[in-house]
Image (spheres, helix red, strand yellow):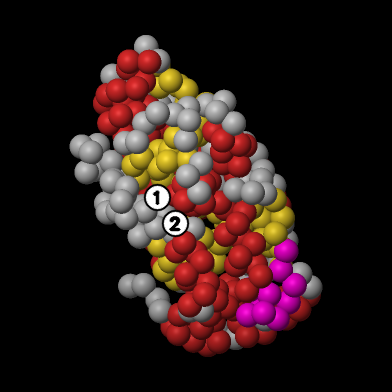
Amino acid sequence: MTLTRRHLLASALAAGAVQAFPVWADAKTLRILVGFPPGGGSDAIARLLADKLKDALAMPVVVDNRPGAGGQIAAQVLKSAPADGGTLFLTHDHTISILPQVVKNPGFDPTHDFTAAGGFATFVNCLAVPAATPAASFGEFVQWVKQHKAGKSAVGIPAPASTPEFLVRLLGQRYGLDLVAVPYRGSAPMIGDMLGNQIPAGVGSVQDFIENHRAGKLRVLAVLGGKRQAALPDVPTFAELGLAGFEETPYYGFYAPAGTPEAALVRFSEALSKVLDQPQVREQLTAMGLTVGFMTPTQLGTRERAYTKVWQRIIEDSGFRPQ
């Protein structure tokens, strides 16, 4: 049975874990690791939450970008960090649920090396094109590739062996296109190339593309998930277009090194819940393309395990072999 926030706190206090609260005083600054470079969606989310968490926790909170390998580098940093509540990793499904299944030696095992500290949102990925790409809909994009690109096109992705790469593979198979996934070190450099018309399409999260979509610099043509997104009500889902199998929505959450005292996790979880209760924070995160929803450490762990199983099937069905 999923524990409520009150039950989690009561459990920690009953176990005498209140004595562990001083670990937050010993860690004079809370460091939030982000596995992607500044300027991308995850970075923007981290900086927004860090600014609010510093007041909720009454301590300095800093964002530490450790980009590379789809979050793998940041995850390795988390694994080696002291388990004192002073370092957390803000990440999404790719690093926790997918990357360990597609990389032979990722350098970390989420099951044994990390512990969930609290979740805050779900989101979806989408396909977008630069304003210079002459396609106003996904159907027009498919026809444009066939008629003007001889059926072959490069599509940017923010990390290799990620949800975006598997979507590119599936789109190619489904529509008879030779789509080549071009991996970047995060969404920011990918979007830079899209805006510079160096690449005709990209797949990433809604929060990566939303601002440029609103500005008319990029066009989001279709989104994953089981329903249209509040931030993009006029953009159809791939399921509407006849491409099923990607309805399970990815998640965002915070993770701590294994062995972090439960009281520290409870305190952070409670602070995160209070931050998410602020209407302005919810509005800002929603505007970024997220579906905001607090998850206790237990709830985040449950969602992570379920999502990992979904992707185990998708990866096996695709014939992909760990690299």
In the foreground, 21 or 300: 300
Residue located beneath label 2 in the image: 289
Amino acid type, label 2: Gly
Magenta region:
53-62
Closer to the observer: label 1 or label 2?
2
Residue 323, x across and y down, in percent: 52, 26
Q: Nearer the viewer, residue 216 or 173?
A: 216
Residue at figure coordinates x 62%, y 74% from the top left: 52
User: Residue 122 in the image: x percent, y percent?
Assistant: 41, 58
Q: Which mark is residue 18?
A: none
User: Is residue 144 in view from this perspective?
Assistant: yes
Q: Residue 288 vs residue 149: left or right?
A: right
Q: Name the amino acid type tagged 1.
A: Val
Label at residue 124:
1
Image position, residue 22 (x, y; %): 72, 81
- Is label 2 in a helix, a strand or a loop? loop
In the image, residue 207 above or below residue 22: above
Q: Residue furthest top?
A: 150
Circle 1: element type: loop
**Is residue 209 one of those drawn in magenta?**
no
Q: Is residue 142 above or below residue 272?
A: above
Q: Nearer the viewer, residue 81 or 129?
A: 129
Rounded to the nearest angstrom, the CA distance separating label 1 from label 2 is: 8 Å
Q: Is residue 241 left or right of residue 41?
A: left
- Tell me the quadrant of the picture where the N terminus can be found: bottom left
Q: Residue drawn 44% across and 83% down?
A: 7
Q: Is residue 269 visible?
A: no
Question: Within 10 angstroms of label 1, few (less than 14), some, or many (20 or more) residues?
Answer: many
Image position of 283 (left or right of 246):
right
Q: Is 118 located above or below residue 79 in the figure?
A: below
